[in-house]
Image (spheres, rainbow, N blue to C red):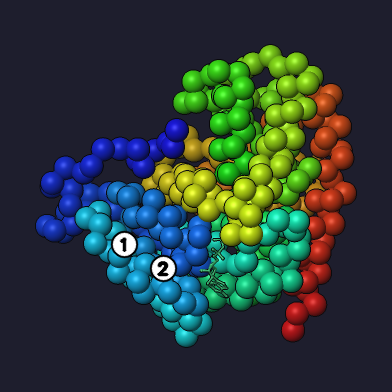
Amino acid sequence: ALRGSFARKAQKPNQSSHHGLQLQASYKVAILGAAGGIGQPLALLIKMSPLISALNLYDIANVKGVAADLSHCNTPSQVLDFTGASELGNCLKGVNVVVIPAGVPRKPGMTRDDLFNINANIVKTLVEAVADNCPDAFIHVISNPVNSTVPIAAEVLKQKGVYDPKKLFGVTTLDVVRANTFVAEKKNLKLIDVDVPVIGGHAGITILPLLSKMKPSVRFSDEEVEQLTIRIQNAGTEVVEAKAGAGSATLSMAYAAARFVESSLRALDGDGDVYECSFVQSDLTDLPFFASRVKLGRKGIEAMIPSDLQGLSEYEEKALEALKPELKASIEKGIAFAQKQP
Ligand code: NAD
Ligand code: LMR
């Protein structure tokens, strides 16, 4: 289940914005790519959060109608629309969290890396604007290939002199959401209790669920571990094939991204017990970026959890070694792209 204030009941009348009594709503969130398949349901889910005072929606087209529609929901946040490059700066001013689902999705037969040529440029341009307008914001990168777009974002922020590795996140929450769902289904567990850490990256074999580290602690046969791991690694492709050319996961992705936004806002708000998996700059392995559980606080990542990578099963140890070359290559491809740009 989604955690945090998301799941709370409707607000009491005296918490509404009509009387200026915005007891909790104080954070500004921007979505870049807000008119897309992920952007629209994500905007709706975020609009439900009582922690948010402003929801800025940016896209290159079709965002006016989305914002007009959403703005009629009687929740606290004010919804504004921004269209095209000339309005991007205004969209980002004063924003606490920027979510980036802009870019093209896969069609059947494609890998996430096949999206690199188009999405690398989109992410680069958008992160440049983030650096110029809200360098202190938490940045949530959804656009694929995440294994490369996050290193691109880091390089762009470095070039602009505003890189804070504690505030740049590749969104891998959907891998955790899927792992929780599939494991609960297979083992007949109550979903609310299930939490599977997923480490590595966000493509194929770089996605590594740690079934030995899940809560509650559950026994799996070798065959079950293999089946579940492969299903979690291929879950994105499962959706791409089912959609048969109409795109990739959007609704489950929006759900997962909303959870990550909610966790970030709770951390910003001073909640001292916020943990999420994310693809971040990392020294837990010999790779410069790696997804693992991180503790979130007011200033972004407050702590890494090195013990999560200790005491892995033999299967997980092998899978971890096997994923490193592909993940390394994707990271280096992103860095090289950003460094060769003028
Ligand atoms: P979509 O095509 O439905 O929507 C993308 C939106 O981005 C469109 O509205 C488009 O106009 C907009 N866009 C394009 N160029 C832009 C630019 N320069 N500035 C701002 N907006 C721009 O695609 P989608 O299904 O929403 O997927 C978006 C991305 O998210 C894809 O790259 C997809 O692979 C990725 N994705 C990641 C995960 C994850 O787990 N991290 C999960 C699902 C999808
Ligand atoms: C996913 O995992 O669903 C996304 O990365 C989209 C995709 O291309 O599979």
* View quadrant of ligand 1: bottom right
Mark 1 within 8 Å of ligand 1, using the beta carbon: no
- Residue 133: % across, % down: 49, 74
Say which element carries label 1: helix
Residue for badge 1: 70
- Image depth: mark 1 or mark 2 in front: 1
For the N terminus, the quadrant is top left
Rendered residue at 35%/38% (across/down): 7
For the C terminus, the quadrant is bottom right
Decide if residue 231 is on the left or right side of residue 267.
right
Mark 2 within 8 Å of ligand 1, using the beta carbon: no
Residue for badge 2: 57
Q: Amino acid at mark 2?
A: Leu
Q: CA distance from mark 1 to mark 2?
A: 10 Å
- Residue 291: % across, % down: 68, 45
Locate residue 64: give its quadrant: bottom left
Check disc 2: other Cα within 10 Å, few if <14, some if 14-19, many if 20+.
many
Rendered residue at 46%/65% (across/down): 34
Disc tally is: 2
Rendered residue at 62%/48% (across/down): 242
Whether residue 330 is visible here, answered yes or no, is: yes
Q: Amino acid at mark 1?
A: Leu
Decide if residue 299 is on the left or right side of residue 9.
right
Image position of 183 with respect to 112: above or below: above
- Residue 210: % across, % down: 70, 30
